[in-house]
Image: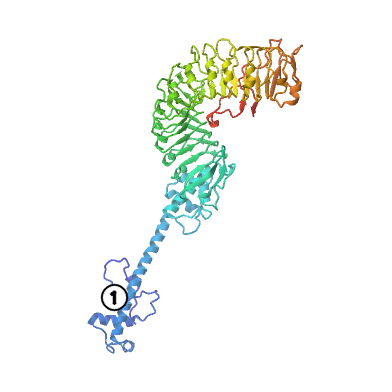
Amino acid sequence: MGKKLRTGNLPLDGKSRKMTTADSRPVLACDLPLEGSSLEKLHLSVEVSLCSRESQSGENLEEGNGSDNSVVTNVEPKSSASSKCVLVGKSITFCSVVIGVVTFAVIFTIVFSQLNNVPDNRSPTVEEVKAWVLSNNYSSRQDLSDPNTPQFMAAKFMSSGPYGILSSNNEAASKWKERYALSVFYYATNGPKWKVLFEFHRKTLPTCEWFQNVNIDHGGVAAIGASCSSGRVDTLRLVNQGLEGTIPTEIALLEELRILDLQHNNIRGTLPSEMQQLTELRKFDCISCTNLDGSLPSWIGKLTLMKTLGLTENKFEGSIPKDFGKLTDLINLALDNNLLTGDLTVLNDMGSLRNLYLEENGFTGTVGEAFFENLDNLETLDLSDNNLVGRVPINLFSNGKLRILDVHDNLINDFPDSIVEMQETNLEFLAIHGNPIENEGFPSTIIFLTNLAHLDATSIQIRGKMPDFLGDLTKLTYLFLADTTFEPGSIPESYQKLTNLKDFSVKDSARSGNIPAWFSKLSKLILLDLDSNKLAGPLPEALPENLKFLLINRNLLTGTIPAGLINSTLKILWMDHNKITGDLDPWCNVVAFQSASSDCNGTSPLVNCGCCDICCDSSSEADCHDRDRLAQYDPEWQEGYDRKRLYDFRNDNNITRL
């Protein structure tokens, strides 16, 4: 038999090199198959003889011309033999090519898999996951080396379940990366103790199903957890779920993230700089995360697609970075209830802003004639509880869009009385209380604010008469003129036109005369505060039908308690320090009240009241009943600047919700 060819004799790299047998004869295609192949059982001597003769003579073999009789007896006619040689040669050549290609593919796959630690169709081990994470720089080696870190625990999680299988496919690798990032976030925020998991972090579910639709306030449905668009995580919403911990750097692996909503949790530490890689982010809310601290990072200015940034009620300090000015698409900015300082000029060119909440910080600077003049789209501006000086920014009244302006408790000392054309004004809420405003007369500018529903001018030092023209602002529901320095006088008769009033206070404003009978016609009135004035005469026979809080203490009222009061459903009745007499026990027996006060103490009590929690002696100079209590309420933006029937009487632990 002819000599067998072995794979060691053959170059398989496809290069043009001369192949030889062991005896230096050139190798022809028909010298194959290789040892070990399925064709090895063929008698190569036949083909070698045929091929060698053909190669030597260049002619077809003739029957009986072989030197080996055993070969000759098996040789076919020359045309058939020649065809067989050609056919065998071509077939073996094709098989060789196929074998070479398959071999190369197998070797490439094995090598690539080994380089990337990619197991094939099986869950990886923890070590394989860690190697994959390190090779892709998802986490640091240090974080992966400690079994107690969120990264190590996430690696362990990813080594189990059907969705942890590693893959070199780009799409699959991206989804794996997102699942790993969410797992790290889960462990970094004490995931096992979240209030509700909402299907989050389930081994048996794909990442895009780690959420649950829930009903939210004011109607509507929101997906709580991680949800996707086009197969990629674009929303992570975990509002008020008991998260406790830090935001890990791996959050940046969620490259398609558009909404990150972590409101009302206990998130501490600084914002990781890796978050600047979330260039698709439109909304980041960490309102009431309570313990985020440090400076506001300047890299936030790189997130130029941002529409909403909420960092209310945290511990940020320092000034607002200049790079915030690059957020030209920002619509909602909430930085209230922090420790921020500095001026606000950096915000002047953020023309897309609609809602700006900066209250309860330490901002300084002057509110001048051109204050925020480029913020033409402002609808809500809250600057309350800061250290701003200057004037009430009436230049903003006429932008046609501003609805809420709250500047209370600053150092503003001027309310310009300027007749400004404001036919298109939409201002509904104006709070200027707690400022050292010392105008001579109440600014008539307010008369143009025909949509005004809330006006709080408590504790300002404006002189002159209590303004009659406020009676023309018939949309008012909340009017507080308490603790003011108006000239003594009666309650203006024009106020009886304010039929939408719910809350009215002229406490400690030098009011005199009788309590007007027309109050009974204000059917929507819930709170009537006339405390600490010089009102005299008897109580009105009738009270507003929905009145719940009547504060008439510290006046000069006389007469007996009317039947209309006895039959009322008041929750708070304060009538001490007057000359009123009568019996409140019938009222005590039928009303589920919260607090009652009267002159029911002393040797000769004026009122019989077995249920009064505050009993004073009108003949005594001893302190009784704190006169500093205010029925005022500062609604916040989270409540839509609406009291929402919540009545909080300051310096008193009692709070009533109707």
- Residue 322 higher or lower than 2, as above or below: above
What x and y, as percent, mark residue 450? 50, 23
Q: Residue at x 55, y 45 (%)?
A: 213
What x and y, as percent, mark residue 32? 33, 75
What x and y, as percent, mark residue 506? 59, 17
In this view, the residue in front, 583 or 15, is 583
Question: Can the viewer see residue 310?
Answer: yes
What is the secondary structure assignment of the residue under circle 1?
loop
In the figure, is residue 597 to the left or right of 505?
Answer: right
In the figure, is residue 508 to the left or right of 293?
Answer: right
In this view, the residue in front, 566 or 178, is 566
Quarter-of-image position of residue 44: bottom left
- Residue 38 higher or lower than 66, as above or below: above
- Residue 534 higher or lower than 3, as above or below: above
Question: Can the viewer see residue 249?
Answer: no
Q: Amino acid at mark 1?
A: Leu
Q: Quadrant of the C terminus?
A: top right
Q: Residues within 10 Å of mark 1 (few under 14, many from 20)?
A: some
Name the residue carrying label 1. 28
Q: Residue at x 34, y 87 (%)?
A: 74
In the figure, is residue 385 to the left or right of 543?
Answer: left
- Residue 360 higher or lower than 278, as above or below: above
